[in-house]
Image: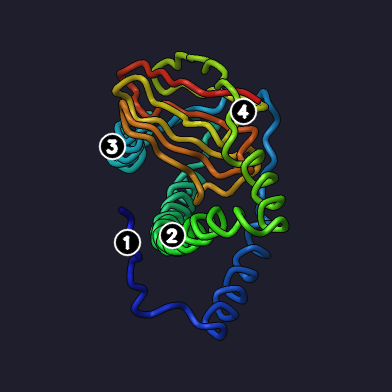
Amino acid sequence: MATPITVTAPITTAQFTTMDTNTASNEVILTAAKITLTSAQTKSRLGVSVIRTSEITDVDTSLVKTNTVAVPSTLDITVYHADISYLASLKLRQAVLLQQHNEITTLVEVAQHNLMIKTNSILTNARVVAETDKGVADAMVVLDEKYFTHAVPSAGIVHTIGEAGVIGLSGINPLRIFTNTEKAMLSILNVGGSAAQTVRVNGFTSVVLPATWVNVVVTNLSSTDAGGFEVFMK
């Protein structure tokens, strides 16, 4: 039987206000810098795995910095190094935001867990009261029809995704499980969403995506292994 999880230091109203202020400041900056990709750009975007990231660093060290003759005359080395610094700054903030995302997600899940325990207790008691109270009985009929009568689930659609491949999907059902069917790690991002919200799915594991993620981009993070996944459509 599920038991409540103790929350020793809940976030206060004042602290929520501070978080909102900081989030708003970040949003102003990110909105100004936002890039809206076309469908073609999303599909053709190069996937840069951990190995490819190492490759960029080694090319910079072995060629750009020490053997400049290898650099095309059309490429500005100063701009290239500025791009490297810009990417490093982005990834640093991404890591911080992702860590904060993970931390607040845990808080949300605990809050949902505790509230669901209380809600289940109310429902259990309501079923007893419904035997003698018409108002409660009528309310339970509506709730039962909405939440406890299930239609036959539809079949999922299995996709394959090549090494470092990218697939855009529209009209998925985010309330159904997204399953990684191969060993390659996948990343999932809501179209138009922040990179800090990217969800990573390890090989042969599943995840339930946020309820608003209807249109997503799936990226195979492996440059050596093809991937695959099962997703349900609306």
167 or 134, nearer to the observer: 134
What separation in Å lies between label 3 and label 2 (alpha carbons)?
A: 53 Å
Observer-side mark, 1 or 3, equals 1
> How many neighbours does mark 3 have within 10 angstroms: few (below 14), some (14-19), or many (20 or more)?
few
Label 2 sits on residue: 117
Q: CA distance from mark 3 to mark 4?
A: 39 Å
Decide which of tag 1 and tag 2 comes sooner along the chain: 1
Q: Are marks 2 and 4 in contact (CB under 8 Å)?
A: no
> Could you tell me the amino acid type at mark 3?
Asp
Q: Which residue is mark 4?
A: 172
Q: Hey, what amino acid is under mark 1?
A: Thr
Mark 1–mark 3 contact, CB under 8 Å? no
User: Which numbered disc, 2 or 4, marks the residue that appears first in the sequence?
Assistant: 2
The secondary structure type at the circle numbered 4 is loop
Residue that carries the numbered disc 3 in the rendered image: 58
- The residue at which mark 1 appears reads as 3
